[in-house]
Amino acid sequence: MSNVSRQPVYLFIGQSGSGKGTQVTLLKAALLKKDPTTTFFSIETGDKFRELIQSDRYTAKLTRTMMDKGELPPAFLGVHMWSHDLIERYDGVATVTIDGTPRVPDEVPLLLSAATLYNWTIHVICLHTSDQWGYARMKGRGREDDMKEKEITERIHWFHTSVEPAIELLRQSPLVVFHDIQGEQTIEQVHKDICEALGFS
């Protein structure tokens, strides 16, 4: 597949509260402005994970028990959510955006194996924000699971202990183009910086 041009994929990563979801939406709008025929395939494992743990499935019960103990759920859960979706629905044409993956280092080689299969170049948009910024944003969003002090603290801790090592693994891959973006700016300025980094302006 080396003779085939690689398809760009846009992966947003950063602390909870860094504005990933908002920036995904703005990037989609920018891509549609460039080409109104663009279609999208969105991987949003955070939403799917919340749906899982709120269900009455046996797996959800075990996962909630782990999380109540302050333990991270096993990597296979996150991998199943996005890999199953890709296998079932991805058509090879839609522009892929990723929000919430990878959650742990063990997911990275599996995501990169998907990139090899689908001939992707993954553009990682890493939104850099401080713990204080993320804390304030999570407290202000009003979603029930973000309002609890303990859970906010656990999310910040989880980012440093699990997501940051995953980010470093992504940096090392030849299939990845890394874009470090300062997230502690206005939404509009962050979007502008992302577009400039991707060569859209």
Image (cartoon, rainbow, N blue to C red):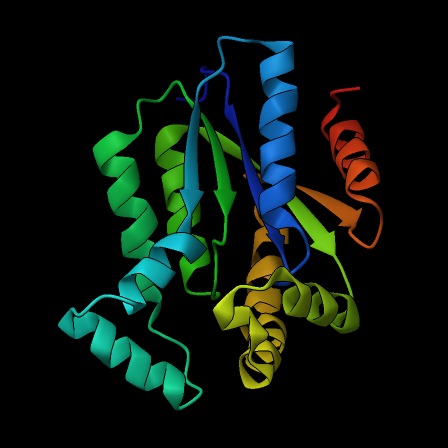
85 relative to 159 in the view: left or right: left
Q: Quadrant of residue 69?
A: bottom left
124 relative to 181 in the view: left or right: left
63 relative to 158 in the view: left or right: left
Q: Residue at x 77, y 47 (%)?
A: 181
169 relative to 53 in the view: left or right: right
x, y (%) of residue 121? 54, 32
| Quadrant location, the N terminus | top left
Vertical relation: 39 (above or below) 72: above
Q: Is residue 185 visible?
A: yes
Q: Is residue 172 visible?
A: no
Instruction: Determine the residue located farthest toward the left in the rendered image.
Output: 58
x, y (%) of residue 30? 66, 21
The one nearer the camera, 76 or 60, is: 60
Vertical relation: 60 (above or below) 186: below
Q: Residue at x 59, y 70 (%)?
A: 159
Instruction: Determine the residue located farthest toward the bottom in the rendered image.
Output: 69
Vertical relation: 71 (above or below) 37: below
